[in-house]
Amino acid sequence: MGIEPDVVAFEAHVGGVMVMGFRSLADRFPGLGSNARGRGLMCACDLPSSMLRDTFVDVLREEGVLVLRGGALTVRLRPAMSVTQEELSHALDAFVRALKRCTDGA
C-alpha cells in the first residue's frame, strides 16, 4: 500500500502555499522572518531571536493557530491533511497580526 498520488499532490500544494506565505511575511516584515522552508505539510521559518519567536508562538495560540517551537529560532507548522484553504488563510492572517503585535509591543 502506497500513498495515493492525489494525497501527495495535495500535501505539496498546501505546503507550497504555506512556504510562499512565510516568504511573503518575510518580505512584508523585513528582518523578522527568514529561512522559510517546507516539505509537504511540514513547514517552518525562523525568527531573529528566541524571545520574539516565543512571543510570536504565544500570540498565535491566542489567535487559535497552533505552531511549535523548534531549535532556538524556529516556528514549525504541520497542519492536518484535512486543512482547508479557509484555515490556511486564517493561519496566514493570524501570522500577520502576531508579527504586528510582536513588533508593536502590543
Image: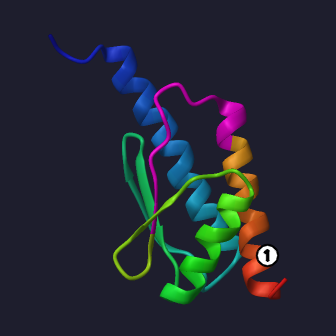
Taking 49 as reference, is 86 left or right? Answer: right
Q: From the viewer's side, name the closer residue of 68 and 26.
A: 68
Q: Is residue 26 visible?
A: no
Q: Where's residue 8, x and y in %?
A: 34, 25
Residue stretch in magenta: 75-88
Q: Is residue 40 visible?
A: yes
The colour mode here is: rainbow
The residue at 55%/88% (across/down) is 51
Residue 87 located within the stretch drawn in magenta: yes
Q: Where's residue 41, x and y in %?
A: 42, 41
The residue at 48%/44% (across/down) is 16
The residue at 50%/41% (across/down) is 79
The residue at 65%/82% (across/down) is 30
Graded by Cα atoms within 10 Å as few (under 14), some (14 to 19) or many (20 or more), the crowding at tag 1 reads: some
Callout 1: SS: helix
Taking 62 as reference, is 3 left or right? Answer: left
Number of numbered callouts drawn: 1
* Residue type, mark 1 in image: Lys
Placement of the C terminus among the 4 image quadrants: bottom right
Placement of the N terminus among the 4 image quadrants: top left
Residue 52: which quarter of the image? bottom right
